[in-house]
Amino acid sequence: MHQLPIIDLAVIAIYLLCMIGVGVWFSRKNRNAAQFTTASGTIPGWALGLSLYATFLSSNTFLGVPGKSFGSNWNAFVFSLSMPLAAFIAARYFVPFYRRSGEVSAYTHLEHRFGPWARTYAMVCFILMQLARMGSIFFGVALALQALTGLEMRTIMAVTGVCIIIYTVLGGMEAVIWTEVLQGIVKTAGAIVILWLVITGMNDGVKDIFRIGMADGKFSLGSLSIADFSTSTFWVVFLYGFFINLNNFGMDQNYVQRYHTARSEKEASRSIWLCVYWYVPVSMVFFFIGTALYAYVQQHPEALLALKQQVAAERQVPLSSLQPADYGDKVLPWFMVNKVPKGLMGLIVAAILSAAMSTVSSGMNSTATVFLKDIYQRYIHPDITPKREMRVLYIATTVTGMLAIGFGISMIGVKSILDMWWELSGIFAGGMLGLFLLGIISKTKNTAAVTATIIGIVVILWMSLSKYLPATWAPVRSPLHAHMIIVVGTLSIFLAGMLLTRVKRLKTDY
């Protein structure tokens, strides 16, 4: 086990105590479900924007993005470039829609539009998506902290998870938002410190990073071919990012719920843009960290030998067969263990914890809200008392956190955090977004919506699972890249619903 210096342990301890302290502070206000879920609409727009930014900037970004750019190039940065377009649509149409509806749950309107089945379907997809996301985040933070402390990954997930559960249960949404404001600042500072340390370790600083990166194609955004959807081209990632961000801003309970915490509709819309203004340049910093680390190890090739030997042993493959993508996620933790000086390690660990805690805490709160509104009150106890509402929220938050830890443990051993999360999110989000767009744009009726959703689910399952078919079934495998699952799934539901509605109208007219 690595022994961190006292000053670094003190920084980490102070950070964790501050997070729990915020939860205790705001626990005095949590007297009803409205305060727990929406902070009674008292959050200023700037704080809400930083909160949304902190949710986006999870440990998947903190660790997965540098690992991705180290192992390949900047192709995944196109995801960030798609955000402004999705933000424009969300700020202009989604925020007013939800603020005027007055419904805390993002899925209540689906029942009004198509019936209980639509609300239940979207809610189940959201919960599965959140558990997958929180699990991948727990795994990411455990991967880094294992390298820094030597502790077992399951232990790290359990301890981190318990801390998050405590302040989220105690403080509710208001604690989630204000801790995220602090966490967003901490993790941004941590990223800047890491980048500075990598740059100062180069022979000729930034010049070497650009020289080596350009020579090896590390700054490439991917092929610009508009005819190739089988590989991760610029346009494939852009389409994926646009649809995922549209789902985030339009259907994800994490974001929809926070639109109701703002003081006004105008401040809620502005918070989306503040999130984009922060996330896009900061995500660029994380991509540059990965490229900088790649350049660093080119000048210090002997430094990576122990790490590569460890990965080769874990996978039981020859050392010579390893490619940068095989150990990309482990390079940043390795650098922090070996190159970060005493006194700064505590800040870096706090930044990693911030990256995990900000997204997990909001995911726990929103999942508990969905359970209360869309399951408990809808199917079990419609006339619930305020006291029982709070009890259900407390229990649901705790159980969600425990399940997320379990999901994280089950992910130990994956190759790329970012790739795994992107594929899972595409599977779960595709059906939700298609049904949502069908409900607010078209005049599709219930029968057509059911049929269109079934068609979309079949398409999503085919694109997701056909790659596991034996070689003899190769002709029926999906030829499209996994990033296209949400794109094709969403369009399948939306276009099928529109077509069925049109056919029915023509038959009626005839």
Image (cartoon, rainbow, N blue to C red):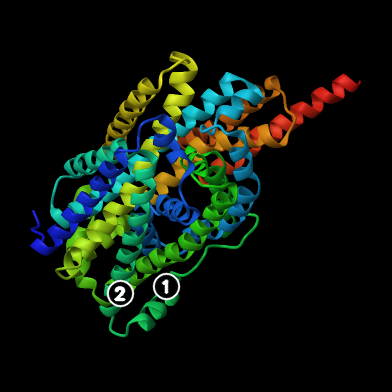
Query: Above or below — where is 163 with respect to 274?
Result: above
Query: How dense is the environment of label 1, judged by Cα within 10 Å: few (below 14), some, or many (20 and up)?
Result: some
Q: Which mark is residue 391?
A: none
Tag 1: residue type? Asp
Q: Residue furthest right?
A: 510
Q: Which is more toward the observer, 441 or 424?
A: 441
Q: Which is more toward the observer, 441 or 211?
A: 441
Q: Is residue 339 visible from the viewing direction of this image?
A: yes
What residue is drawn where x is 86% and y is 19%? 508
Q: Is residue 312 visible from the viewing direction of this image?
A: no
Query: Above or below — where is 157 with respect to 297?
Result: above
Relative image position of residue 331 (x, y in whole percent): 27, 61
Tag 2: residue type? Trp
Relative image position of residue 154 (x, y in whole percent): 19, 40
Q: Quadrant of residue 162?
A: top left
Q: Which is more toward the observer, 135 or 216?
A: 135
Report the residue marked by disc 2: 196
Give the SS element for disc 2: helix
> Where the C terminus falls, by quadrant?
top right
What residue is drawn where x is 76% and y is 31%? 499
> How many dots with numbers?
2
Relative image position of residue 431 (x, y in whole percent): 56, 33
Report the residue marked by disc 1: 216
For marks 2 and 1, give the one nearer the viewer. Answer: 2
